[in-house]
Amino acid sequence: MEYRTLRNQNQIPAVGLGTWQVTDRAQMVDVIGSAYEAGYRLIDTAAAYSNEIALAKAIAAHEIPREELILSDKVWNTSRGYEAVQEACKKSLKKLKTEYLDCYLIHWPASMKLYPNWEEMNADTWRGMEALYQAGLVRNIGVCNFKVHHLEALKKTAEVMPLINQVELHPGMPQEELLSYCKAEGIALEASSPLGNGQILTHEVITEIAAAHQVTPAQICLRWALAKDAIVIPKSTNPVRIRANLDVFGFTLSEEEIRRIDAMPYCGGIGIDSDEVEEFG
Ligand code: A2P
């Protein structure tokens, strides 16, 4: 396993497990069992995934010691603001049956289409995140789906800038500008949907490079994102794929292969633009 060292010197595994759409409790027990056995320690969830209770039950079912896990959770859009974000975090802690979160992230910036005061709203939610960090309830604070202008706006008032920014990043969506901004600012980029939600795995650039290395297309996508120093959190409910998605440290991509993948057009993924999205949830 590779680790990423955050700006506060805390370490996060470079590969974690995404749990979006895993809501069935029995399935969660199986998924967490397979992932833990395979060596996953970082588990990504969100209040909006409605699976925090299922995740806690799965962790308990496998008697996984809390200190071995890096639990990452997200506050939903309905809990923006200094007080509301702290309340939401405490509710999530209860659901997850834990005293602290390793990572807590703002799921979406306030939409500038809906809120003329989006900057102020994000700043206020962020003050609540900083309070959680200072109180020790959260070891690392961050955001999701923030673009450069959201981060620049936050900078005006933040005492501690986000340590992590989780965004859609995969072949076809290389996030070059954001990646270099985050590198310069010491913000770790975490790739949600690193497999483009499974839709990019048949693209010929990916399948050709996978054949050349005798690995799977998914492993190529993950290796490519890791080469950019991203943290990746592929989601799978299949034990074979869960194992394979972690087995990405035995090969490297050449500069030429990375350039070929960089040049791929958008060919699948989630595709939600945080400036365009009308509120949801
Ligand atoms: P499944 O859960 O059946 O494995 P992303 O993490 O980019 O959102 O992608 C998740 C999607 O990709 C899910 O539909 C998942 O399906 C699928 N997936 C995950 N790992 C692999 C893999 N190694 N090969 C093919 N599909 C995968």
Image (cartoon, rainbow, N blue to C red):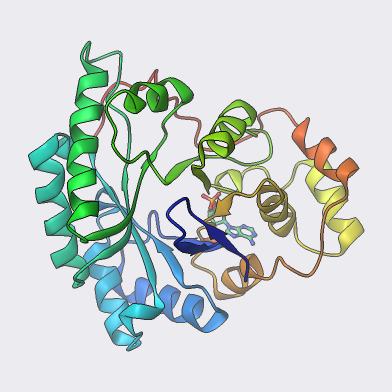
Locate the N terminus by quadrant: bottom right
Q: Position of residue 268 (x, y in %)?
A: 61, 36
Count of marks placed on residues:
0
- Residue 121, quarter of picture: top left
* Direction from residue 190 to residue 26 in the image, left or right: left
Q: Looking at this view, is 124 or 267 the one in front? A: 124
Residue 214 position in % (x across, y down): 86, 64
Residue drawn at 24 percent across, 55 percent down: 50
Side (left or right) of 8 relative to 257: left
Q: Quadrant of residue 26?
A: bottom left
Q: Is residue 192 visible?
A: no
Residue sitting at x 66%, y 48%: 225
- Residue 227 pos. (x, y %): 72, 50
Q: Residue at x 18, y 30 (%)?
A: 124
Up the image or down, 113 lies above or below 200; here it is above
Residue visible at 66% across and 54% down? 222
Indicate which quadrant contains ligand 1: bottom right
| Residue 79 in sight | yes
The image position of residue 78, as x and y in percent, is 16, 36
- Name of the residue lying farthest toward the bottom: 63
Q: Is residue 270 above or below residue 217?
A: above
Nearest the eye: 206 or 109? 109
**Going by the image, does 1 lie left or right of 35?**
right
